[in-house]
Image: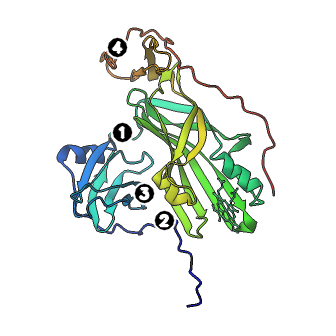
Amino acid sequence: STGTVAAAAVVKRATLPATPPASEGIDVDEQNLAALASGQPATVTASGFRPNEEGIKVVVYSTPVLLDTVTADASGVATWSGALPAALEDGAHTLTFQGSVDRGLAFTLARATAAIGTCTVEGATLNWGYKESFRTYIEGIAKGGWTLTDVAYRYPDFVWENGAGSLDGTALTGLVTYGGSIAFTGHDGALNTTLGNARVELAGDTGYLVFDVTGTTQAGESVDQQGVRLAEFPLADAAVVDGALRLDAVATTLTEAGAAAFGTYQAGEQLDPVTAVIPVDTACGTAVAEEPEADAGASAAVTAVTEPADTEGAPVWPWIVGGLVVVALAAGGGVLIARRSRTAQAEPETTEG
Ligand code: HEM
């Protein structure tokens, strides 16, 4: 009445319902249910939403993990396609769509093998600065810093070592766990966000930087989410070559799940590029690459053949990709994709406000 208008909080609620709001109403055919339950990419749909309704959250339980947001079509049917996070443990889960109505699907996740793929990963490294403007803000305006556990800071990146896990070098699926944590602080404690237990998840076309996110968003909401696919990056031209899968300054963006857990930034926000060297055991297979394409602008398509170590004499056939005949099978052979390489500058270990 005095003419003062309270500013509405525009940041989306980071808090998801603690239990699934629905366990029925998501439609899935047998094939897609089998794929979903084994951790493979699947497509599910649900109806009853408003025509063209936006921002329908796709959330998997028991511990709520936001996977994505989707938009309904003109008939109010929402569709989600994707694979469940590799960090999700086997067992009973409920997939939900949360919008103007809630829909769900109870299923049991049972991955075919305990480890994803046959290639064992050890001694993997990861370099990622999260977001340069955020680091600058922390050190400047926020008068804060970061506390590192089992992570180093070598400007402009946080650096993790000794990542371990497994992957399938052909399907480019896998999970490498680096652990550690970065606790960002500032504004005399008002800013307090920890990115813990770093993982790199490979999911076919797309890779994710996965963290447990705890703390307080800029809007003051407390967050405690496990296994958040915080950042994503394309895996289009990644391959196992010379015993390792290398990511060389690949651009990353904030995911929907990351935006919900961290606050402030919108999904799609540009984050710092990721560099990683993910060595695989020698039994993992031989990289196979075709001639680089004549068109210098196009990136060469490269694939890898995974040779399981102990498959009773079964032949392993090279893949034929995109109509190009794969020729080389010799150990160590392969064409490494040339990319911009970065030189890390050495900087002080930590910052303090
Ligand atoms: C006392 C409370 C706070 C004050 C006064 C404050 C102030 C500010 C200001 C002035 C900016 C703009 C900086 C610029 O334009 O360069 C900013 C940006 C930002 N703040 Fe805060 N903030 C507070 C709390 C928080 C909290 C709790 C978070 C939680 C994560 C947070 C995260 C951010 C982020 C991510 C940015 C954007 C940085 C960038 O990428 O440029 N802030 N804040």
Q: Which residue is mark 1?
A: 113
Q: Residues within 10 Å of mark 3 (few under 14, many from 20)?
A: many
* Residue 193 vertical placement versus 291 (above, below): below
- Circle nearer the viewer, 1 or 2: 2
Q: Position of residue 171 (x, y in %)?
A: 38, 30
Kindly identify the amino acid type of the residue bearing the numbered disc 1: Thr
Which is more foreground, mark 3 or mark 2? 2
Labels 3 and 4: the sequence-earlier one: 3
Give the residue at x 52% y 32%.
121
Residue drawn at x 53%, y 18% is: 336
Determine whether the residue tagged by mark 1 lies in a helix, strand or loop: loop
Tags 4 and 2 touching, CB below 8 Å:
no
Which numbered circle lies on residue 324?
A: 4
Q: Indicate which disc residue 66 carries.
A: 3
Q: Nearer the viewer, residue 144 or 124?
A: 144
Res 188 quadrant in image: bottom right
Q: Position of residue 302 (x, y in %)?
A: 44, 20
Task: Name the image quarter holding residue 106.
Answer: bottom left
Disc 4 from disc 1: Cα separation: 31 Å
Residue at the (45%, 48%) spot, across then down: 87
Residues at badges 4 and 1 in contact (C-beta under 8 Å)? Answer: no
Asked whether the residues under the numbered discs 3 and 1 touch, taking CB atoms below 8 Å apart as contact, a structural biologist would say no
Picture coordinates of residue 314, whole percent (x, y):
30, 18
Q: Which quarter of the frame holds ligand 1? A: bottom right
Determine whether, in the image, residue 48 is placed left or right of residue 347. Answer: left
